[in-house]
Amino acid sequence: MTGNSSRGDFAADPRLLRITAIAAASGILSTVAADFLLHLIRFFTNLFFFQMFSSENHSPSGNTLGLWVIVAPVAGGLIVGLIARYGSEQIRGHGIPEAIEAILFGKSRMSPKVAVLKPLASAIAIGSGGPFGAEGPIIMTGGALGSLIAQGFHLTSSERKALLVAGSVAGMTAVFGTPVAALLLAVELLLFELRPRSLLPSAIACAVAGFTRPLLLGSGALFPLHTVPLDPLGLASCALAGLIAGGLSWGLSTLLYATEDAFGRLPFHWMWWPALGGLAVGIGGYFEPRTLGVGYDVIGDLLANHIVATAVLAIVLVKAVIWVIALASGTSGGVLAPLLMMGAGVGALLGPVMPGGDPAIWPLIFMSAALGGMMRAPIMATVFAFELTGDANALLPLLTAASVSYGFTVLFMRRSILTEKIARRGFHIYREYGIDPLERHYVDEVMTRTVKTVDAGLSVSDALAQHFGPQQTHRAYPVVRDGVLTGIVDRQMLVAAVETGLANLPISTLCGDTRPEVATPGETCRQVAARLAALALDRVPVVTDLESYRLVGIVSRHDLVKPSLTVFNEERERETFWRVSLSRNPRAPLTRDPPASR
């Protein structure tokens, strides 16, 4: 067996089983919470638009209020503003940025107020006509439930994060019936890492929510669809669709935050902004009632091409305007459903002129591309559209369009609609991350093996003279007896011993019985670097194991940055290995040049 035989692919920890079991329970609770939220939205929809106490599913577009329809969103916005002002300001917004902020900057702690007030405020906002989806609020609510459950156990911040995200994506699974896409949402947007300790709880929570959903919310694809596969020309058309959707994402995001800035310049308190946003929603809803509320029925009609072009144009334009104004006003609601509606609407308008296939597929393609660009999560958007429809023929076109849209927004947008919200609160998020080079390398790869030591039997005065005189090369030295580490000494320690009359005693008396901080050869550089930072140390001895304490080397901060040099070179050095010969002889072989940096 080699010295590497004990090293595995992952940092396995038995606590993972405990966290996963808690996540499974969170999956059930989030599904119940999603069912409750949807019933609450229906209740307020019936109350605001039909003046009845019922949780039956009625679309607000079927109201007969006439001009009075303008009052409903204003009243809803006023109530939401009051809840935010006197309840919790965290209920404002569309949910996902707030979840990300709690994960990265709040140690994954959420308050019970959020778990109660977020679904209530969102149900009132959406039920009174707000052009939002239920997914953002349930992501926030499910996350709050996961966080609250985690706070009842003795867990680390990273473990709380795993449970917060598990609750969030379980809620999304319950609303849409898309467990794989919800898990990808966790991977691409929420976890900021890819480790078993975070991936497994989220996966199990999504699976549990997926199995629990039929008991409360029904089963099957939300928008069943079957389209004809595209021909080869469709690839270019999908790329064009991605560019258009990327431009749509850029335009909507820019307009949203310009509108938010305009609200910020208003001379009255933000508590009143949702009511003002509700006024815009009411006016838009008066002229185009199908833009009110969640609009899942409208999305289904758009995907099935059941709406004429003139009506589609009106829906897209009005939905975009009222969504931007309402969301900028600081009310509570999600972004996924509006993006699905606007993307599908653009696809329905452009489908007849897109070459390469059946026009019926383009609402679905544009819907996925808009989501992939706006959220900057192309894999999630692709799988999400597939799970919503069950249309396997659309998978390749969906991937192409969503990826191109994602590439467009990466190149032309500094931040997404999600991270821009957080940046405006003073926190910058870097969405690009990879494997830490310190995790790929171990202490025995970077440590210094030839160590200058101090014998434990040497007197204090002799040690001071021999090791800390003009010839001193290190700030501190390990103290050993027969190769076994007993302590660490530095100049300050020895000078203090001399001043207190201990100059003739063996240096081992200064080390005491407390063993010094050490590293072992099998630890990762990241583990040791974290300890050096936490303990404010520059270097630690390396011992064979924690029982024998036999010294085999020493590792410093300088040693621990060595793995990063490889990554730096991989990123910066450009090399040419092969060059095509320009000889007139068609049989002339390729010539190889030595590597050259450019």
Image: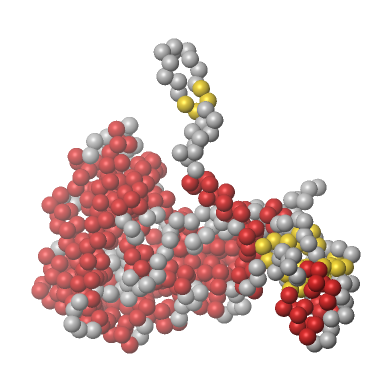
Q: Nearer the viewer, residue 543 or 118?
A: 543
Q: Is residue 151 visible?
A: yes
Q: Is residue 27 visible?
A: no
Residue under the image location 52 percent in, 62 percent down:
202
What is the quadrant of residue 91 in the picture? bottom left
Q: Position of residue 201 (x, y in %)?
A: 56, 63
The answer to whether 265 appears left or right of 387 in the picture is left
Q: Residue furthest front?
A: 470
Q: How is the image coloured?
A: secondary structure
Q: Position of residue 381 (x, y in %)?
A: 38, 53
Q: Nearer the viewer, residue 214 or 369?
A: 369
The answer to whether 410 appears left or right of 314 in the picture is right
Q: Is residue 169 above or below residue 52?
A: above
Residue under the image location 77 percent in, 51 percent down:
3
Residue under the image location 62 percent in, 67 percent down:
530
Q: Position of residue 560 (x, y in %)?
A: 63, 59
Residue under the image location 36 percent in, 83 percent down:
88
Q: Residue furthest left?
A: 67
Q: Is residue 430 above or below residue 475?
A: above
Q: Nearer the viewer, residue 299 or 528?
A: 528
Q: Nearer the viewer, residue 99 or 47?
A: 99
What is the quadrant of residue 260 in the picture? bottom left
Total numbered labels placed on residues in the image? 0
Q: Position of residue 420 (x, y in %)?
A: 33, 65
